[in-house]
Image (cartoon, coloured by chain):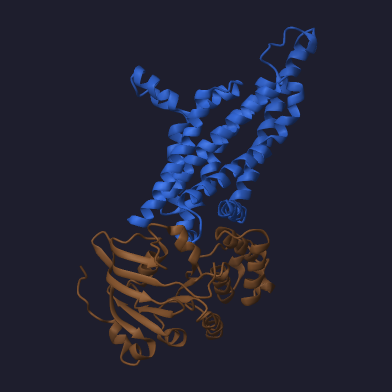
Amino acid sequence: MIPLRALIRKELGVLFGSPMAWLTLASIGLVTALLFFDNLRIYNQILFLYATTTMGGFESDTVPAYVNLRDQVFLPVMETLALTLVGLVPLVTMRVFAEERARGTDELLATTLLTPGQVVAGKLIATYAFVALALALSFVYPATSIVRSGLGLGHLVAVYAGLFALGIALASVGLACSAFATSQLVAAISAYAVAFVLYDFRWMAQFLPERAAAFVDPFSMHPRFGAFAEGLVRAGDVVYFAGYVVVAAALARLALDQTRVR
Amino acid sequence: MSGARGASVETEALERRFGDRVALAGVTLRVAPGEAFGLLGANGAGKTTFIRLVTGYLVPTRGSVRVDGVSPVDDPRAVHARIGFAAETSRLYPELSVRGFLRFAAGAHGLAGAAAQAAIERAVDRFSLGEVLRRPIGNLSKGFQQRVNLAQAFLHDPALLIVDEPTAGLDPLQQEEVRGVLRDAEGTRTVLLCTHDLDEARALTSRVGVLAGGRLVACGPTAEILAGDALALFRSDCGEAA
């Protein structure tokens, strides 16, 4: 375990030694803040409209049930944050394996006590830890609305578990692409391509027969995340997202082994 | 592990192909424990491929390689525990501080806590890295980067030190510094030096092997091999190795 711990620390050190990590964290913080305050502004305007155009004001039954902090502010912010992850995570994952190979430092790793499995595990764990940190930063603004939104703690945990699962799946796609790519650019572009396709298959539905569309739909990330956003943590969704980790680890290991024999 | 004795390196009809291209053809070689052995050859002669086969980074197409009787294919961890590897200077992590990198290298070789700290302190003293310990590697001069590179290779006191082009790109003063360090290592561990610099081979090795076109075209005491027209050996036309 000592070599694995050293590798995880090294990965985080290299990650935070590059501007990309800070840029990604800043972007996620900024996007969340902008979205949150923009949605809050709109929510307040809607409430103001109801308050000024009806006799009863806030206490009136005329304010529809769906006009609440949870549905008008918190969940839309989380939904857009999910899409933001699709845009940002490949920028972080593109370098993880490809840069190591381009620099020739993969040879250095190969002469230590790290096994190929540990190399893959260390890189995956460090990247997932970064995703968790980025999401923790995004939590600051929504957290301020939790008390008043009527969003239960269980629901909140489910939403963030969904975001984390989605982030891990996107990171896994990026890591697998990076493991096979010869350059960071190729890794990023291929990760974007795969992530956008896997994020939501519904765009394909219009080109497919109904039965085929129904078949591919469960493979989309977005509906799975949607269930978490509704507060539902289903075993099938957890297994689906965990599958990305397993596939990415297997592919990355395959890529490392190929280097030795090709 | 101790580097007091050094590790042996033995290859038997070692061959490595990349598709149709033969990078190394039938190399049989023995490096004795504690010996300073130079692997010479022009660029593309097969030196780096040979080293990569010894470290286990590549798998041989045919033949075998053993470090202290252990195959890097069968038991890579046992071999890696014996090896200290210093590649060319560019193969470092420029974002990491010197301390951070040495801490990683120690951990990656299984050293932790007080043992890691002591190893790092020894390496810092040995390679005079105290003044740059907190600086990012990317901000260091090539000379300092090479010192860092060698320091990580020495950290776990390896029985076999593999050094690839250790003075490439360094100025004469820096070259002398690096050679001094490698000279000190002689006798305490096996040194496998990969270079195309004949003066370096004369200064640092007792025996050399010359690779040309992937074949071992000469092997023997350094003074004897390099006394004649060594460049002619570099140019040896071995035909298509097969």
Tell me which corner region of the image, top left, top right, bottom left or bottom right, holds residue A74: top right
In the shown orientation, is residue A223 left or right of residue A258?
right
In the shown orientation, is residue B51 left or right of residue A84?
left
- Residue B47 position (above or below residue A200): below
User: Which chain is in blue here?
Assistant: A
Name the image quarter holding the C terminus of chain A: bottom left
Q: Chain B in the picture: what colour?
A: brown
Q: Residue at x 34, y 78 (%)?
A: B42
Q: Considering depth in this image, is B241 or A13 the residue closer to the camera?
A: B241
**Is any atom of residue A104 visible in this view?**
no
* Residue B104 screen position, x and y as percent: 59, 59
Q: Residue at x 57, y 63 (%)?
A: B94
Q: Considering depth in this image, is A29 or A154 the residue closer to the camera?
A: A154
Q: Residue furthest bottom?
A: B227
Q: Considering depth in this image, is B216 or B175 the residue closer to the camera?
A: B216
* Residue B15 screen position, x and y as percent: 28, 66
Q: Residue at x 68, y 73 (%)?
A: B130
Tell me which corner region of the image, top left, top right, bottom left or bottom right, holds residue A229: top right
- Residue B164 position (above or below residue B171): above
* Residue B162 screen position, x and y as percent: 46, 72
**Is any atom of residue B211 visible in this view?**
yes
Q: Considering depth in this image, is B62 or B8 the residue closer to the camera?
A: B8
Q: How many badges with numbers are in the image?
A: 0
- Residue A47 position (above or below residue B167): above
* Residue A249 screen position, x and y as percent: 46, 43
Q: Residue at x 39, y 23 (%)?
A: A205
